[in-house]
Image (cartoon, rainbow, N blue to C red):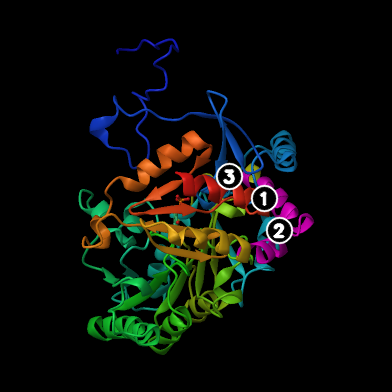
Amino acid sequence: MSGVVQAADETWKTDDHFLHPWQDVTAMDRDEWTHLEASGGIYVRDSNGNQLIDGPGGMWCVNVGHGREEIVEAVADQMRKLSYFSPWSMASTASSELAQRLTAMTPGDLNTVFFTTGGSTAVDSALRFVFFYNNCLGRPEKKHIISRVNAYHGSTYLTASCSGKMREKAQMDMIEDTIHFLPCPKPKDRAADMSVEAFCDEKVADLENKILELGADKVAAFIAEPVMASGGVIIPPEGYYKRCHEICKKHDVLFIADEVVTAFGRLGYYFASEDVFGVTPDLLTTAKGLTSGYLPLGALFISDRLIEEIKSVSNEPRSFFSGFTYSGHPVSVAAAQANLDIFENDKLLEHVREISPYFANALKSLSDLPVVTDVRVQGMMAAVECELDAGTPDENRDTGFTAKVDAICQELGLLVRPTYNACVMSPPLTITKAEIDDMVAKLREG
Ligand code: PLP
């Protein structure tokens, strides 16, 4: 259609002109999309007036629930005061105050925040900071990055290259020579005669062996989600994350914790690395729950040690030539402040810690279904793995089955996030026990 805007009619749900993330380009004129129009609490409402439980919490992000007037008001107030400023030339009080509030909450000496526009740009900035740091320290060859199969770190060129969902990477160009992948630390996939402890030893050894193979003087960083999210809620064996951190320290390799999903209450704490896994990373990235998805905002936290090291070797200015027009956007920052106020006022972390065992038990009750082969839950993130053909390896198990479960569940009033062979559940953290029962009953029926 050339330049004519078609009036909405009964076919308007077909998004002919809108390429969605991850969409099959050849199916744009065939795909039917559910359009959402209203929301409140754990619910969203579609354009036919059907109420649906938001099982994935948007995309692991609507942590304080939908329709929080406190955030709406804070955002409107900030827009009236100052809708935008250039973070290059000016400071905004709103962003400076948020930086102070956040760095008082972060683990260890992660006392500097670099604001971004979301998770991908936070991780991209972390990787670029690592390159910058090694250049400042006079070791430009220390640039290799180690990641893991099934990890997801974003959709920029650099972060997609560090993501380990191999099938999704096949048709997209990627950086290949300096990015390396370790096998996924998924305990379910260990050999039948191997203990979880031995499996953990093996996965930790994978990291050390890769560093030794490449040469520690070449390896800049290891990047890891504490619990892999879109890879299918992969919960590593006990001790794995901490031992990987120790290996990194031993070989002078920076540890980047990608907490885009796991921060802001998803695992019961503001940041999971330290409080759940006992690790103080060198760099930590986050987004999503920082504003509960009300507005885009991401953050990279940088340790004092790295900044001090750069200062100690530099007799001249060392500018980090990186940033975004919307870095620390004052309106997004206002949403984050109001979001954090809700965490405090509603005692949301305490609520998560109290309710997550109930959430886990409810989802694990689905294990009796013949098609369910594994239920993985940590905090308020869960994956119900379904297998029709147990012989096919993980990467190729997307039989479309979980997408069908999602379609049926939508008719029953529940949104599910199908990822490969798993149904992912990460509802708003405000969910009650009765709502969990309803959600799980619908999933069982679906
Ligand atoms: N890192 C992790 C662990 C994620 O799960 C995601 C998104 O799901 C990202 C990074 C990218 O974040 P965004 O989609 O906000 O760019």
Magenta residue span = 332-356
Separation of marks 1 and 2 at Cα, in angstroms: 17 Å
Asked if residue 410 shows in the view, the reply is yes
Residue 45, quarter of picture: top right
Q: Position of residue 33 (x, y in %)?
A: 41, 30
Q: Residue furthest bottom?
A: 250
Which of the pair 93/339 is nearer the observer?
Answer: 339
Q: Tell me the tag on residue 348.
A: 2
Residue 223 lies left or right of residue 93; in this view the side is: left
- The amino acid beneath tag 1 is Ala
- The amino acid beneath tag 2 is Leu
Q: Nearer the viewer, mark 1 or mark 3?
A: 1
Q: Is residue 346 magenta?
A: yes
Residue at image coords 48%, 71%: 316
Using the image, determine if residue 39 lies above or below residue 137.
above
Residue at image coords 73%, 33%: 80
Residue, disc 1: 434
Q: Nearer the viewer, mark 1 or mark 2?
A: 1
Residue 326 lies left or right of residue 15; in this view the side is: right
- The amino acid beneath tag 3 is Ser
Q: Quadrant of ligand 1?
A: bottom left
Q: Tell me the tag on residue 86.
A: 3
Question: Few, some or many C-alpha atoms within 10 Å of disc 1 (few <14, some 14-19, many ≥20)?
Answer: few
